[in-house]
Image (cartoon, grey):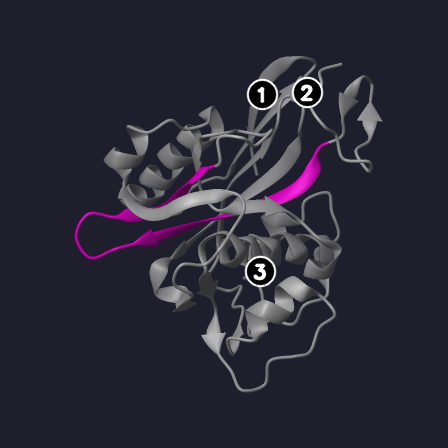
Amino acid sequence: MSDVAFDPDDKIVHGALRPKDAATLILVKHGGEPRVLMGQRHSGMAFMAGKFVFPGGRVESCDQRVAAASELRPDVLAKLSSGITLARARGLALAAVRETFEETGVLVGMRSDKCPRTRSSAWARFFAHGIMPKLDTLDLVARAVTPPNRPRRFDARFFMADATVIAHVVEDAANEELLRPCWLTLAEARALDLPSITRRVLAEVETRLATGPCPVPFFRFNRGKASLTYL
């Protein structure tokens, strides 16, 4: 075993870490050449250090209980909830919204004077800006499970939304994971140091921008071999 620090709640399954639920949000800004919101991870991080990625992270238990201004569309929910509960599927979408706020200061949703109270410090900071998350604007564009030989493993769902869903941006938001969040053209993004899965999802985004809705790819490993199916 390497000297990488593992979380105490990580589970070992057949010699490999059990992947944890994670969610990512790809925001696309139009008006000329499309741009996507990305950021660079700190060089000292144990997972994907120095790589450029879309904002996202691990799902927290609080994400399943948070109120939203609108819910996932039925077609998105059907694909997202395959093999899991509806509450867990909803939590994935809300995690993508929360992580985007925590890592970039971007709040996706709509303004409201009736934001709920919550025991979650992360969501309390979100609601403090008078914003309620909107889920009907999110599309599911990919799912990917980290290979079994990695020190950290995630079962990640990648969502996509138009940047017009941004209700507020906290300037100079402090975060511990992303450096210099920025809007990049697809060509600029492809020229950066990207994780392989980020590069593949970026290609999926480009296809959708060109042709519209299409099947959702599911990237994973089956008996040690790369597998691609569609949701």
- When asked about the image quadrant of residue 5, the answer is top right
Residue for badge 3 = 74
Q: Is residue 140 above or below residue 223?
A: below
The residue drawn where x is 34% and y is 65% is: 164
Label the magenta part by its dominant secondary structure.
strand
Considering every residue shown, the one lying at the far left of the view is: 32
The mark nearer the N terminus, 2 or 3, is 3
Q: CA distance from mark 3 to mark 1?
A: 27 Å
Residue 205 covered by magenta stretch: no
Q: Which residues are magenta?
A: 19-41
Residues at discs 2 and 3 in contact (Cβ within 8 Å): no
Q: Nearer the viewer, mark 1 or mark 2?
A: 2
Question: Foreground residue, 67 or 229?
Answer: 67
Q: Amino acid at mark 1?
A: Ser
Residue for badge 1 = 227
Q: CA distance from mark 2 to mark 3?
A: 32 Å
Q: Nearer the viewer, mark 3 or mark 1?
A: 1
Residue for badge 2 = 148
Residues at discs 3 and 1 in contact (Cβ within 8 Å): no
Q: Secondary structure at mark 3?
A: helix
Question: Label 2 neighbourhood size at 10 Å, few (<14), some (14-19), many (20+)?
Answer: many
Give the percent coordinates (x, y) of residue 125: 59, 69
